[in-house]
Amino acid sequence: MQGRVVRTSHESACLQGNPLGDPYERDIYVYLPPGYDGTRRFPVVMMLAGFGSTNHSIAAWSPWAPNTVQLFDKLIVDGECGPAILVLPDCFNRWGGSQFIDSEGSGRYQTYLADEVFPFVDAEFNTIADRQARAVVGRSSGGFGALRLGMDRPDVVSVIGSHAGDAAFEVSMRPMLTSAAIAFDLAGGVEAFAKEVPMSGPQNATQFDAIFTLAASAAYSPSSRGFPFADLPINPATGRLRDEVWARWLEHDPLNRIEASSPALQEMSLIYVDAGNRDEHGLHFAARLLKDALLRHGLPVHYDEFEGGHRGTSWRYGVSLPQIVEALRGPE
């Protein structure tokens, strides 16, 4: 690479005392582009990892293919993308992902990103400390987190990139709940599952669906009744939907929040949305619905639909990042 990566750490105030006992000191990777010499300031792109992944996953080295940081570096070197600082925060938790929002069941992760990570990076590096020079992007759950950060905190960012981001929960999430109920039932209940499976990780598809459901429940339907600090939208003994809990999930669906969030989204310079045309979770249907809803509100959306599914899609950043950086205020 012609740019360089700095690995630093930050001690979070808002993550201290989180209910799951997750670390409040977190590593942050910061990519500095070619030309970063301490005299110029650069825009910032924050990249959020998908469920079950971390910033370490995004930056992981492979002998067979470039990681996303190397891909970004090559885009800049080849003149296909403007220079920008790339920030990779860590919002992993006991259940495999925080969904990047504030929750009494897992922690204040959106506040951590908006009010701690961005200011920390601004203080340590030569950034343009202005919302017009900041973007947030992510894949899958990271795409959900990007959508929500733009919707909830337009004072912080001006560009959103959602790659197959979680949305249209009735289409994308409702089908996995029966599978999750099977795994909870086989484990002897939710509490037994919550104590055992995070230690070894999910061993099959039903356990993966279950741990995602637990993570999403901690984010969307938290409980104050104690461990695991989440109300499930299904009865694990019967697989039947708990309508009142499911309604709480639907309140967090980005598709259902566009109307109320329209003033915030009007502040965006670009909303990039994509998906693969055979996404295993139906998130291409979600992306199409998001695109249509955003267009109905006159919002600045760019939509791409690719051949492929949900996994192995980091190459799509080669398409989105040049557009995202172009929409930002450039280097000073």
Image: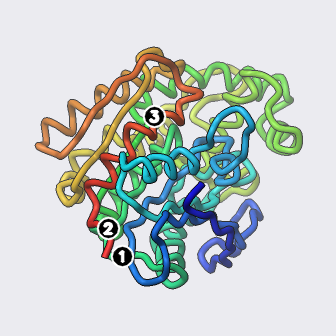
Task: Judge left or right: residue 41 versus residue 269.
Answer: right
**SS for callout 1:** loop
Q: Residue drawn at (74%, 37%), measured in percent from left and top?
A: 63
In the picture, the disc for residue 323 is none
**SS for callout 2:** helix
Inter-mark Cα distance, 3 to 2:
22 Å
Q: Nearer the viewer, residue 287 or 131?
A: 131
Q: Mark 3 = which residue?
A: 316
Mark 2 touches mark 1? (CB < 8 Å): yes
Vertical order, 36 against 21 (above or below)? below
Q: Earlier in the sequence, mark 1 or mark 3?
A: 1
In the picture, the disc for residue 133 is 2
* Quadrant of the rendering where the N terminus is positioned: bottom right
Q: Earlier in the sequence, mark 3 or mark 2?
A: 2
**Snapshot quadrant of residue 134:** bottom left
Numbered label tally = 3
Amino acid tagged 3 = Arg
Vertical order, 127 against 215 (above or below)? below
Vertical order, 145 against 181 (above or below)? below
Inter-mark Cα distance, 1 to 3:
26 Å
Q: Mark 1 = which residue?
A: 128
Q: Position of residue 45 (x, y in %)?
A: 43, 59
Task: Judge left or right: residue 254 versus residue 55.
Answer: left
Task: Judge left or right: residue 268 versus residue 32.
Answer: left
Q: Position of residue 280 (x, y in %)?
A: 54, 18
How busy is the neighbourhood of tag 1: few (under 14 within 10 Å), some, or many (20 plus)? Answer: many
